[in-house]
Image (tube, grey):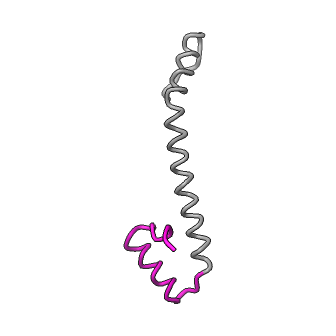
C-alpha cells in the first residue's frame, strides 16, 4: 500500500497534492481508453451484421488477424 492512514492536516494536504498532480494524466489516459473502447464496440456491432463466410466477413477477419484488430476502424 502506498499511503498510510492520514493522521495530520499536513499529511492530508500532501495526499491531495499528489492526487491533483496525477489527476490530469489520469483523465487523459481515461479518455484514450474510452476512445478505444468505443472503436471496439463499433467494430463489434458491425461484425455482428456480417454473414459468416461472406466476402466482407472474410476480409475483415483476415485484417483483424494480420493487423491486430484495427480493421474495425475502416469501412
Residue 27 placement: quadrant: top right
Instruction: Between residue 7 and residue 31, name the one nearer to us.
Output: 31
Q: Residue at x 45, y 68 (%)?
A: 69
Percent across and percent down for residue 40 are 55, 63
Percent across and percent down for residue 64 are 44, 72
> Is the residue 51 above or below the residue 31 in the image?
below
> Is the residue 57 above or below the residue 23 in the image?
below
Tell me, yes or no, whether the highlighted magenta stretch contains residue 69.
yes
Could you tell me how many numbered marks the image carries? 0
> Is the residue 19 above or below the residue 60 in the image?
above
Q: Residue at x 50, y 67 (%)?
A: 73
Residue furthest toward the left?
Answer: 66
> Is the residue 63 above or below the residue 16 in the image?
below
**In the image: residue 58, left or right of residue 47:** left
Q: Residue at x 55, y 47 (%)?
A: 31
Percent across and percent down for residue 3 are 52, 24
Q: Residue at x 59, y 66 (%)?
A: 42
Span shown in magenta: 50-75
Tell me, yes or no, whether the highlighted magenta stretch contains residue 34.
no
Instruction: Between residue 39 and residue 53, name the one nearer to us.
Output: 39
Percent across and percent down for residue 26 are 52, 38
Q: Main secondary structure of the magenta part?
A: helix
Residue furthest toward the front?
Answer: 75
Residue 67 placement: quadrant: bottom left
Amino acid at each position: 500500500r502506498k499511503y498510510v492512514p492520514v493522521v495530520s492536516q499536513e499529511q492530508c494536504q500532501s495526499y491531495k497534492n499528489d492526487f491533483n498532480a496525477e489527476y490530469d494524466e489520469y483523465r487523459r489516459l481515461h479518455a484514450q481508453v474510452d476512445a478505444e473502447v468505443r472503436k471496439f464496440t463499433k467494430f463489434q456491432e458491425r461484425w455482428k451484421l456480417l454473414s459468416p463466410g461472406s466476402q466482407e466477413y472474410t476480409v475483415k477477419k483476415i485484417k483483424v488477424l494480420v493487423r491486430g484488430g484495427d480493421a474495425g476502424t475502416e469501412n
